Each structure stands twice: as structure tokens, then as C-alpha cells.
């Protein structure tokens, strides 16, 4: 973890392809939070995707090419001392970079990429992890008048071990009543291409999560990955359900106050 | 002539050996440390309550003579409950109990004592013999001792031998086990460690042909996770513990 | 049978999802078992135990050929006969030979996944030999003519009413939904089978190399019965079941008991080292051990040795959110379901299509890895299997093209922007067509906003610069 000095840490925002194309508001909110709480944010414009969808579908060659590109973009900035950390508003994308990138570089030709991957993973963080563990944030000043439940996304929870940090930030929300979901750690059913290849099972799992949400009487369920959020909002909207799923960045930076459209 | 099994054996082993062997051997895992340092009567009580926790039952008695009395009581009560027709009529037949040989039971003169109380011990010779098998299938009570018992789990361990049938603790509805206090140990790990230190562990398993750990009555929860007892093995496991150190 | 195990995958999944009764039963059973497991593991230093268990299993897999030879040596020394079988056919041949030698007409069996794997019951029936499953759950599915649907709870998919109807039909009992009465009926039927059978067959939980011992874990007592009452006893042992020492076996016994049903230990742990000794009252006159490969050495050669650590507790299935929705029969005609089943069923080449479907029947949530008593990294194995499927060229042309296009778009700026523009204009249309239609059948459309993050960012920067300039 980088030591906080008197100068502000410089964070390269790894916005993720889903946020970039579908939920830009989440990216904006993430940048706002980081800047407001002490970091300088740069956005390496050439970034695209970490390769997780291809990797999870079994296409390691394509995933490797995307991983190389990622490292080509982010590593030099790190190596040149232009940035201190890479932060993404997504648990699954960070897990990809930290845990799977090294697995992709196994040949002698890729020895340099392996080295870069190992260096990069030391300074890659999920948003709430960075806010709490590095910037020392607890109170964001955000408020949410109502009942709120937290859904821990699987990669964030199990691969990164990040759970206390988002819960801490939510605990400091003004006016909010945080309620616990039944079996909160159960997967929501998105699972990447699983949502398409096994759409019926995916839907059944999502509907179970929604039933648990109803039982908790929360109006909003908050999470750290837009993938899970898209899946649950998709189901909620189709059911014309009053509940909403929202990304934690938009909740904490005040751009979602319960009324507006989530993920704008 | 090369035995039939050679070719598959060689094929499997050579395929396995062809693979690159991995890392160093893991050390022998440390067993969980003993649960309790209790001894004697308090250890016996711990054993008894653990056995009861898992749907077994237990009496802790002072002397060998009490055990014999209790056996008579239990056999008569159970026979009545189980509808044993020989229990009490005008010309009563002795109640048959499938049993280990009296020589293998740690009570002197048990056979005679029980006979006087109308209970006979059925000690089969050879259960592969049709008539012995038919007879052994009838009693609803089986009587054995144990090699050891363990307080941490409420387990008994039995090894077969001459006059020590497997059937006596397996076929009948009720298993009555005589457990001398000296044979109760805190944990089976500690007991195994002793055998291991004395270099008797491997031979203990090999010599008898089968070792059975029995922890309470037979159970199943296959039907909707609802617990039922006595599916194949005994429905009752009752331990008679007595102080044999006196 | 509500889910036809031999139907195609899509059909099986649809049938499972449509069966309310099944899903209800699965829900209750899996959550009950998971809770029990959690309590039993919380009562001990579970991390230490899991590490020890993994070390014990790892050592065995890494020293397999030596341990198998040691096992064989000691089994032979104990008076057993040992047979080696490269595949199901050789194993069945060995068993049937033994049966023939002893003019076996009736066989009793305790629960064993490996005997399902090789199709033992069918082979017996074809040879005119009567075989009866004695584990209560297996007995029930045998009566019903179905395969088991869970590694340790074969009849997890049936409610008591189903079982009662079945017993009324096949055993002629009076109507009752009392489990105790149903069990008593099974006990009575099976008691005569045990006493009359010529041969007993079991699988093996652990095979101890140092003493030549076959260990069986049961709660009912049928394991002791099949290995003690008939004249001939045959144990079928997957080669991965071997462990080095008695202590390893005792440790793993406790892990499997806690993980499977939440018990400290199972009711019965039978450790059979040989046929009955001279002068003993009972026990088999002959004990045969069949060491079965059936693809296991090949699995290890391919780098999937981790999957061989499994001690068959079923905890992964109980926690899996996918298994909970579809149950075991949806995994197809395999005895191995749930997460571990999704790994080894394709590897054992059980059914040609399994490799293309089962590794993808997972969200990779990782709950299974968290509960596995030997810490098998199941999600990683599934990912490896998925890349094998792709390498073999077994994915659809459409998918390969789509991924290649996506890859290209993500690697160079111009294609990325073009694709994004296309998505903005035509995304809604794409969601109406397969495969994306799979999304929109049950989920609201994804909306592509007119400005992406990267379009908004320069405006924000400019805005900030303007502000600071003021």
C-alpha cells in the first residue's frame, strides 16, 4: 500500500468497458469520490477492456491480447512514476487483473508481461477498497433517506476479500437504515456469459435474490459491480418492481438520492 | 503364465509414473489435540453424556455384579417391548441374546447368572452355516464388549475374533455393550497415537480383518432430512460402563 | 422421472426449473445440510483441519503409484485378492468373473458412486444376477428406476409423499407418510436380502496403504453388513482413494462427516483389511479389491490432479446456487453432480456433450471453494476446462466470431469506437436477436447512453479548468 505523503496520490482510473459504454455516471461518480477524498485522478484514454469476458468464456488467446494492451497502457505510467495506483469501480475486473493476468503469461516470450502484471497487481484496487484502506475515508457526506440493503458481489467478496470497506462506507450514510438480505452472499446469477448461455438459470437465481430483497423491505440494493446491477435492474424493470439496484459510487457521491434513474 | 491382472496393473502404474512427480512430501498431519484430560469416573460420565447426545444411552455402574443385574433388567424390559413371545408364558423359554462368547465378556460367571434369570446367550460358531444364520437372525438383542470407547465422540471400537462375532453388534435391533471404565479414552486420536507409538497400529487393523467404529445407533436422514433410527444397524446402542479398576 | 437424465442439457435444465416440487425439496435439503456443515466446521479450527486434509490428500495424489503398490502389497498380505482395471469394462469383467466363480445369484450393495460410474448394476442384471441397493436413498431410487441426484443424499429430490407412494406400489405397504414407518419397511425388506446374498459390493471412502485397509463411511450400517455377511466381498476402489496412513484416514473421516452432514463422525466407520480369520464366526471368506483407473490417471496427466483430491462430501453441491436451482439430474447421466461433478464428469468423458455444457453451468461465484474441506479451487478448474473446450474448437462459430470481433474492438481504438457507435444505435435491436435475446426475454433492455464515459471526461476536465481559471 502506498504511503500517504503530503502530495496527493495519483490514481489512474480503470473505468471498465461496461461502465464506459453503459453506465458512465458510475465512472464519473468514482472519479468525483476519489478527487473529493484526496486523490488526483487521471484517465488513460486508450484503455478498453481487461479481457475478463473472453477469459471466462475460455478464450485465453484473446484475453491475453487484451491483458497485454492493458499493461501497455497502465504499466508505463506506473513505471515512470506518473501514477501511484490503478482504481476501478468493479470487483470482478480488479480480480481479473490481480489473479488471472499472471496466469495468462506463462511462456518465455511473455516473461516481461508477467513481471509487469505482478507489479501492476500490487497497486490495483477496487474503488471502496482504495477509499477506505488507502485514503482513509469513512464519512462521505452522502445521505440516503430510506431502507438500503448491500449485496456483496462474488468476485469482490471471495477473490478480493473486500467486504468490510463498502459496509463501512454505507454505515456512515446519513439517514439510511441498512437492512441485511437473507443469504446475502448468494450469487445473483449474472456470471458473465452465463447470463446469456444459461439465461434461465441466471434468471431463476436473480429472481431469488429479488425475493430476498423484497423480504428485507429495502427499497434499494447497493453493490460494487455494474454487471450484477444490470442483471438485477433488468429483472426488476421487467417485473415493474419498485425496488432499484444501484452502484455504490453513485450512492456515495450523491448522484443517486433514491429518486433518479440508477446508473445514469 | 502371466496372471490376467498384470497387464492392467503395469499399464496403470507406468502411466502414473510417467507423469512428472510434484513437490516434496507433506509431513504427517498433526491430529487435533485431545478434547479432555478427564479420567476415571468423570471421563466415564463425559462418555455417557456424549453417547446420549447422539441418541444412544448409558448406565454407569459401580461393580461388575451390578452390570449383570442391569443386563437382566434391560433384556426383560426390551423383550416385553419388542413383543418377544418367549418373554413370559407359563412354560417360558429362555430369552435368547445374540452374544460374544462369555470368555470375551469382562464379567465372571455371567453365563450362569443369566441362565438362572431365564436368559440364554446364543454364541454362533459359523454364520455361513444356514442353521446358525437362521438362529442368529432372530434375537432382538445383541451383547458384546468393546476394545475401547471414546468420550469425545461417544464411539465404541470393536474388532472381531474367535467368539466375537460381528453380527452381535450389527444384526439385532438393540446393541448392549459392556464397557469397562479402563477402556474409555478421551479421544480416539490419543488412543491411536498410543498404538502408533507402540508400533501396534497397523497390525491391530490387519490381524482381525475388520475394525468397526460404532458411534450411536444406526441413522438415516435420506427421507426429507428427517432423522430416523435403526435403518439397518441397531436402533438402540446402550453402554453399560462399570469400574473394573476396583 | 421429472428430469430426463438422457435428454439434452437445455431440456434437462428446463424440466428442472419447471418442477416446483423438486425446487422446493432441493431448497430445504441443501440449506439444511449447509447449515449443519457450517455449525460443525465452526466448532473446530476448520482452517487448520482443511489444510491438514488437503496436505494428506495431496501427498497421496503426488505419490500415487508408490502408495498403490504399498496398498496392494498389504492387501495381498492380509489375504485379499487384488485386481487392477484400466476401465469400466475391465472392472466389470473382474467382478462378473468373481461372481461366476462363486455362482453368485444375489448381490447386496452399499452406496458407491464408482459403481454407478461403471454401470455395475446394469452389468449384473444383464448377467441374470439380482442386485439390491441397501443404502436407504439408493434403495429408493433403485425402486423408482432413477439415478441418484446428489453425491451423498441420493434422494434429495424426492418428498416423503413420493417415497410413500413408491413403497406402497413396490412393497405393498399401508399408506403412511411417517419416515419412521417407511424406514422400518425398508429395514425389513433389506434384512432378508442381507442374510441371503451371496456377494456384497461396496465402494471405498479411503484405502489405507500402510495397512491394506478399505474404509467405508455410513450412517445406516449397510456398509458393515455388505462387508461382513455374504461369503464374498468385493470393494471397488478408484485409484485416487488411497491415503498413506491410518491417521490420514481418521482425519479425512472426520472432515467428510462434518462437511457432508454436520456430524462429528459418521455412525459407522468400517475398516476392512481382509477376509475372516480362521475360527472367526463371520466375515467374508473372500475379499476382493478392484483398483479402478477409468480415466483418473489421464485426468492427472492433463494437469487436473487437483480434482482428484475430492473426498466426496457433497458440500459444494449443497452451497452451489446453480445446483440449488436445477438439482443433480440436470447434470446428466452421471453420478457426479454439483461443482465437482461439473469438473469430473467432463474429465471422465462420461458423456460426450458434458464437456461443452457442464463447465459453463456456473457463475464462478466461488462459494464451493470456500466450503471444500480439501480446498479444491473449483472455479479455476472450471475455467481451465472452458479454455480446453475452446482450444478443441468445440464452441460455436457464432461465438468464436463474436469473441474475435470483441477482441479486435477492444485492442484498437477505431474498432472500439465503431463498435460502441453501433451498439448505441442498434443495441436495442441486437437484444431482440439471439443470442442476446436470451438477456431480454426476462430482463429489461440495456440502454446505451449517447455519451460514454470517455466522451464525458474531456468535458469534465474542461469544466474544471474553466472553474479554476475563474
Image (cartoon, rainbow, N blue to C red):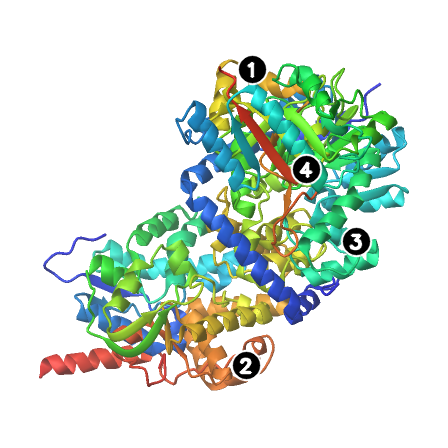
Identify which residue, C190 or B114, lies in the foreground: B114
Q: Mark 2 = which residue?
A: C430
Residues under numbered marks 1 and 4 in contact, where contact means CB atoms less than 8 Å apart: no
Where is residue A250 drawn, in percent x and y? Answer: 30, 76
Q: CA distance from mark 4 to mark 3?
A: 33 Å
**Residue at mark 2 to residue at mark 4: CA–CA distance:** 75 Å
The percent position of residue C126, horizontal first and vertical second, equals: 88, 45
Residue at image mark 3:
C143
Task: Please identify, in this view, whether the residue under mark 2 or under mark 3 is nearer the observer.
Answer: 3
- The residue under the point 14% across, 62% down is A8
Kindly identify which chain the residue marked by label 3 belongs to: C
Residue under the point 66% across and 28% down: B72
Helix, strand or loop under label 2: helix
Is residue C237 in view?
A: no
- Do dots 3 and 1 share one subunit? no
The span from disc 2 to disc 1 (Cα, nearest Å) is 73 Å
> Which structural element holds mark 1?
loop
Quadrant of residue C203 within the rendered picture? top right
The numbered mark at residue B200 is: 1
Residue A169 appears left or right of C200? left
- Check if mark 2 and mark 4 are on a common chain: no
Q: Is residue A202 visible?
A: yes
Q: Nearer the viewer, mark 1 or mark 4?
A: 4
Q: Give the alpha-carbon distance from disc 1 to disc 4, as whole Å.
A: 39 Å
Q: Which mark is residue B78?
A: 4
Q: Residue furthest front?
A: B90
Q: Is residue C137 left or right of residue C168?
A: left
| Label 2 close to label 4 by CB (< 8 Å) | no
- Residue B4 image position (x, y, % from top left): 81, 26
Which quadrant would the C terminus of chain A be assigned to in this image? Answer: bottom left
Amino acid at each position: 500500500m502506498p504511503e500517504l505523503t503530503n502530495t496527493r496520490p495519483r490514481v489512474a482510473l480503470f473505468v471498465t468497458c461496461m461502465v464506459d459504454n453503459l453506465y458512465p455516471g458510475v465512472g464519473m461518480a468514482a472519479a468525483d469520490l476519489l478527487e473529493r477524498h484526496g486523490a488526483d485522478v487521471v484517465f488513460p484514454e486508450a484503455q478498453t477492456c481487461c479481457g475478463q469476458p473472453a477469459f471466462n468464456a475460455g478464450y485465453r488467446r484473446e484475453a491475453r491480447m487484451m491483458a497485454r494492451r492493458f499493461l501497455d497502457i497502465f504499466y508505463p505510467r506506473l513505471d515512470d512514476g506518473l501514477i501511484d495506483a490503478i482504481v476501478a469501480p468493479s470487483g470482478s475486473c480488479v480480480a481479473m487483473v490481480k489473479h488471472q493476468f499472471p496466469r495468462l503469461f506463462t511462456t518465455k516470450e511473455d516473461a516481461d508481461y508477467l513481471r509487469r502484471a505482478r507489479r501492476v497487481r500490487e497497486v490495483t484496487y477496487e474503488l471502496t477498497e482504495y477509499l477506505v484502506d488507502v485514503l482513509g475515508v469513512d464519512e462521505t457526506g452522502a445521505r440516503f433517506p430510506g431502507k438500503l440493503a448491500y449485496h456483496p458481489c462474488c468476485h469482490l467478496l471471495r477473490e478480493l476479500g473486500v467486504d468490510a470497506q463498502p459496509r463501512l462506507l454505507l454505515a456512515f450514510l446519513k439517514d439510511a437504515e441498512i437492512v441485511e438480505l437473507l443469504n446475502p452472499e448468494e450469487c445473483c446469477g449474472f456470471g458473465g456469459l452465463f447470463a446469456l448461455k444459461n439465461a434461465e438459470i441466471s434468471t431463476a437465481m436473480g429472481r431469488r435474490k429479488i425475493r430476498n430483497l423484497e423480504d428485507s423491505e429495502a427499497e434499494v440494493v447497493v453493490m460494487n459491480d455494474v454487471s450484477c446491477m444490470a442483471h438485477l435492474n433488468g429483472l426488476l424493470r421487467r417485473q415493474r418492481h419498485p425496488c432499484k439496484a444501484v452502484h455504490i459510487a453513485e450512492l456515495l457521491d450523491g448522484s443517486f438520492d433514491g429518486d433518479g434513474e440508477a446508473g445514469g | 503364465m502371466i496372471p490376467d491382472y498384470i497387464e492392467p496393473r503395469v499399464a496403470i502404474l507406468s502411466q502414473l509414473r510417467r507423469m512428472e512427480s510434484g513437490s516434496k512430501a507433506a509431513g504427517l498431519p498433526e491430529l487435533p489435540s485431545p478434547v479432555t484430560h478427564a479420567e476415571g469416573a468423570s471421563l466415564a460420565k463425559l462418555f455417557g453424556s456424549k453417547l446420549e447426545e447422539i441418541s444412544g444411552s448409558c448406565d454407569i455402574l459401580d461393580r461388575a455384579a451390578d452390570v449383570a443385574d442391569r443386563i437382566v433388567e434391560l433384556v426383560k424390559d426390551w423383550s416385553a417391548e419388542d413383543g418377544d413371545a418367549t418373554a413370559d408364558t407359563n412354560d417360558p423359554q429362555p430369552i435368547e441374546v445374540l452374544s460374544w462368547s462369555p470368555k470375551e465378556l469382562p464379567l465372571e460367571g455371567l453365563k450362569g447368572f443369566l441362565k438362572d434369570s431365564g436368559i440364554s446367550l446364543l454364541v454362533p460358531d459359523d454364520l455361513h452355516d444356514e442353521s446358525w444364520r437362521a438362529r442368529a437372525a432372530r434375537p432382538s438383542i445383541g451383547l458384546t464388549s468393546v476394545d475401547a470407547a471414546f468420550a469425545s465422540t461417544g464411539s465404541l471400537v470393536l474388532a472381531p475374533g474367535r467368539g466375537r462375532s460381528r453380527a452381535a453388534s450389527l444384526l439385532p435391533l438393540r446393541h448392549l455393550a459392556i464397557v469397562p471404565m479402563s477402556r474409555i479414552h478421551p479421544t480416539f486420536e490419543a488412543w491411536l497415537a498410543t498404538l502408533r507409538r507402540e508400533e501396534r497400529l497397523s497390525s491391530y487393523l490387519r490381524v482381525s480383518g475388520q475394525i468397526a467404529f460404532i458411534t450411536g445407533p444406526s441413522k438415516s436422514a435420506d427421507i426429507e432430512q428427517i432423522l430416523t433410527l435403526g435403518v439397518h444397524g441397531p436402533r438402540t446402542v446402550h453402554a453399560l460402563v462399570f469400574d473394573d479398576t476396583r | 422421472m421429472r428430469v430426463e437424465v438422457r435428454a439434452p442439457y437445455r431440456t434437462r435444465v428446463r424440466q428442472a426449473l419447471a418442477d416446483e416440487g423438486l425446487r422446493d425439496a432441493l431448497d430445504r435439503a441443501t440449506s439444511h445440510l449447509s447449515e449443519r456443515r457450517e455449525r460443525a466446521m465452526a466448532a473446530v479450527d476448520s482452517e487448520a483441519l482443511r489444510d491438514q486434509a488437503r496436505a494428506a490428500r495431496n501427498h497421496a495424489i503426488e505419490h500415487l503409484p508408490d502408495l498403490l503398490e504399498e496398498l496392494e502389497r498389504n492387501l495381498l498380505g492380509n489375504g485379499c485378492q487384488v485386481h487392477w482395471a484400466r476401465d469400466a469394462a475391465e472392472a466389470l469383467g473382474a467382478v462378473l468373473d468373481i461372481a461366476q466363480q462363486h455362482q453368485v445369484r444375489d448381490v447386496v450393495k452399499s452406496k458407491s458412486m464408482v459403481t454407478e460410474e461403471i454401470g455395475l448394476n446394469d452389468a449384473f442384471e444383464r448377467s441374470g444376477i439380482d442386485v439390491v441397493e441397501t443404502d436407504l436413498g439408493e434403495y429408493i431410487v433403485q425402486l423408482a428406476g432413477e439415478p441418484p441426484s446428489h453425491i451423498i443424499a441420493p434422494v434429495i429430490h424426492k418428498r416423503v409423499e413420493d417415497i410413500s407412494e413408491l413403497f406402497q406400489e413396490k412393497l405393498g405397504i399401508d399408506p403412511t407418510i411417517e419416515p419412521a414407518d417407511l424406514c422400518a419397511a425398508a429395514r425389513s425388506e433389506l434384512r432378508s436380502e442381507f442374510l441371503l446374498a451371496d456377494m456384497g459390493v461396496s465402494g471405498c471412502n479411503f484405502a489405507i496403504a500402510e495397512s491394506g485397509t478399505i474404509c467405508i463411511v455410513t450412517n445406516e450400517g449397510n456398509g458393515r453388513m455388505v462387508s461382513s455377511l455374504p461369503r464374498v466381498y468385493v470393494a471397488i476402489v478408484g485409484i485416487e482413494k488411497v491415503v498413506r496412513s491410518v491417521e490420514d484416514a481418521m482425519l479425512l473421516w472426520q472432515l467428510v462427516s462434518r462437511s457432508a452432514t454436520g456430524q462429528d463422525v459418521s455412525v459407522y466407520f468400517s475398516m476392512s483389511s481382509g477376509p475372516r480369520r480362521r475360527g472367526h464366526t463371520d466375515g467374508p471368506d473372500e475379499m476382493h479389491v478392484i483398483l479402478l483407473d477409468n480415466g483418473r490417471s489421464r485426468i492427472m496427466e492433463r494437469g487436473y490432479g487437483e480434482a482428484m483430491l475430492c473426498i466426496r462430501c457433497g458440500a459444494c453441491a449443497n452451497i452451489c446456487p446453480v445446483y440449488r436451482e436445477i438439482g443433480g439430474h440436470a447434470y446428466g447421466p452421471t453420478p457426479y453432480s454439483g461443482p465437482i461433478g461439473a469438473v469430473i464428469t467432463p474429465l471422465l468423458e462420461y458423456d460426450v456433450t458434458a464437456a461443452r455444457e457442464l463447465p459453463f453451468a456456473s457463475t464462478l461465484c466461488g462459494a464451493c471453494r470456500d466450503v471444500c474441506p480439501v480446498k479444491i479451487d473449483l472455479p479455476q478448474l472450471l475455467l481451465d476446462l472452458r479454455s480446453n473446450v475452446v482450444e478443441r474448437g468445440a464452441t460455436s462459430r457464432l461465438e468464436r466470431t463474436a469473441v474475435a470481433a470483441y477482441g479486435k474492438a477492444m485492442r484498437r481504438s477505431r474498432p472500439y469506437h465503431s463498435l460502441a457507435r453501433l451498439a448505441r444505435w442498434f443495441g436495442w435491436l441486437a437484444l431482440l436477436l439471439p443470442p442476446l435475446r436470451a438477456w431480454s426475454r426476462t430482463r429489461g433492455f440495456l440502454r446505451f447512453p449517447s455519451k460514454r464515459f470517455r466522451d464525458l471526461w474531456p468535458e469534465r476536465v474542461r469544466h474544471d479548468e474553466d472553474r479554476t481559471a475563474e
